[in-house]
Image (cartoon, rainbow, N blue to C red):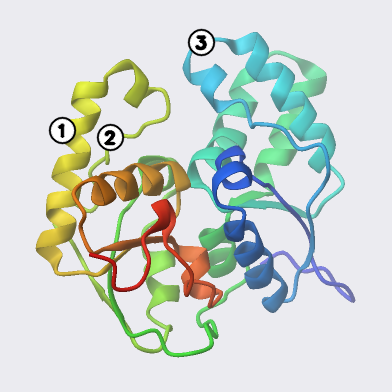
């Protein structure tokens, strides 16, 4: 952990597009976890998309324009933390690549990348958090989906599982092929809908075979994709972002509106 003598680390919370529009409670959960860990948390106004859709589609000019806005907005903070492996992998890895050869923006992009973290890795690896107080014991059997960006881009696997192990009453079981893509992939699901549908069907089959009543993960795009498919087949399984469970905010309807006891 980087030491900040005499003061709490000042963290800028990166509020992702999907979170803002579809699940703002994830942001409140992330802020609570960071504050409980001793951070001073701010959510800057005028946040924009990180630029990942444009970058992945080859529209590098648009991606650079968005990246410049993000860099300027978050430069004053000690850390930038987001509840999304996908967005934070873009900031950490793609921003330096976008500005390679630009003497001004390249250095700024690299500095921002070095202090940008996905939420679970920041709590566990940077701050050394090993236990959380989720409040009331959570009597659920959950399985965890490893998102592609978080797992392969940032090495996020053991951190969320270690933190979830401290939640009283929560039983965590591993599904088959937990590390296999769910088929979302951002623009992938739009370009290749038939392949995407088969992939999410396979993921849902593994979830159901695990016997879990709850699915957890760290990327809202993946979770919305999985939750939508579970809802279409009327499966009695709820889906939450890991931050919601760790912060004790998983008593409401799950993603895609799945409520307790729904059939």
Label 3–label 2 contact, CB within 8 A: no
Residue 94, position in %: x, y?
57, 27
**Is 122 drawn above or below residue 131 in the view shown?**
above
Q: In the rendering, which numbered label is found on residue 183?
A: 2
- Position of 132 with respect to 168 (left or right) is right
Q: Helix, strand or loop at disc 2?
A: loop
Q: Nearer the viewer, mark 3 or mark 2?
A: 2
Badge 3 local density, few (<14 within 10 Å), some, or many (20+)?
few
Q: In the rendering, which numbered label is found on residue 117?
A: none
CA distance for labels 1 and 3:
26 Å
Write down the residue under mark 3. 58
Write down the residue under mark 1. 198
Residue at horizontal 41 percent and vertical 56 percent from the top: 257
Badge 1 local density, few (<14 within 10 Å), some, or many (20+)?
few
Badge 2 local density, few (<14 within 10 Å), some, or many (20+)?
many
Label 2–label 1 contact, CB within 8 A: yes
Question: Between disc 1 and disc 3, whose residue precedes?
Answer: 3
């Amino acid at each position: 952990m980087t030491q900040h003598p005499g003061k709490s680390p000042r963290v800028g919370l990166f509020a992702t597009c999907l979170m803002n529009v579809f699940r703002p409670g994830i942001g409140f959960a992330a802020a609570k976890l960071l504050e409980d860990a001793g951070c001073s948390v701010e959510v800057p106004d005028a946040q924009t998309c990180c630029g990942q859709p444009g970058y992945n589609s080859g529209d590098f000019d648009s991606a650079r324009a968005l990246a410049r806005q993000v860099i300027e907005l978050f430069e004053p903070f000690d850390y930038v933390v987001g509840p999304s492996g996908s967005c934070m992998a873009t900031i950490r890895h793609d921003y330096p690549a976008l500005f390679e050869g630009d003497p001004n923006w390249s250095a700024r992009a690299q500095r921002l990348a070095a202090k940008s973290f996905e939420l679970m890795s920041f709590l566990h690896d940077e701050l050394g958090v090993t236990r959380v107080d989720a409040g009331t014991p959570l009597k659920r059997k959950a399985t965890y989906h490893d998102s592609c960006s978080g797992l392969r881009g940032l090495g996020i696997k053991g951190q969320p599982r270690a933190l979830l192990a401290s939640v009283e009453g929560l039983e965590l079981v591993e599904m088959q092929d937990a590390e296999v893509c769910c088929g979302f992939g951002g623009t992938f699901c739009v370009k290749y809908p038939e392949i995407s549908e088969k992939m999410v069907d396979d993921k849902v089959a593994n979830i159901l075979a695990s016997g879990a009543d709850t699915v957890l993960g760290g990327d809202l795009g993946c979770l919305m994709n999985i939750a939508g498919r579970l809802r279409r087949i009327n499966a009695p399984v709820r889906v939450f972002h890991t931050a919601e469970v760790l912060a004790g905010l998983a008593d409401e309807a799950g993603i895609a509106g799945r409520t307790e006891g729904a059939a």
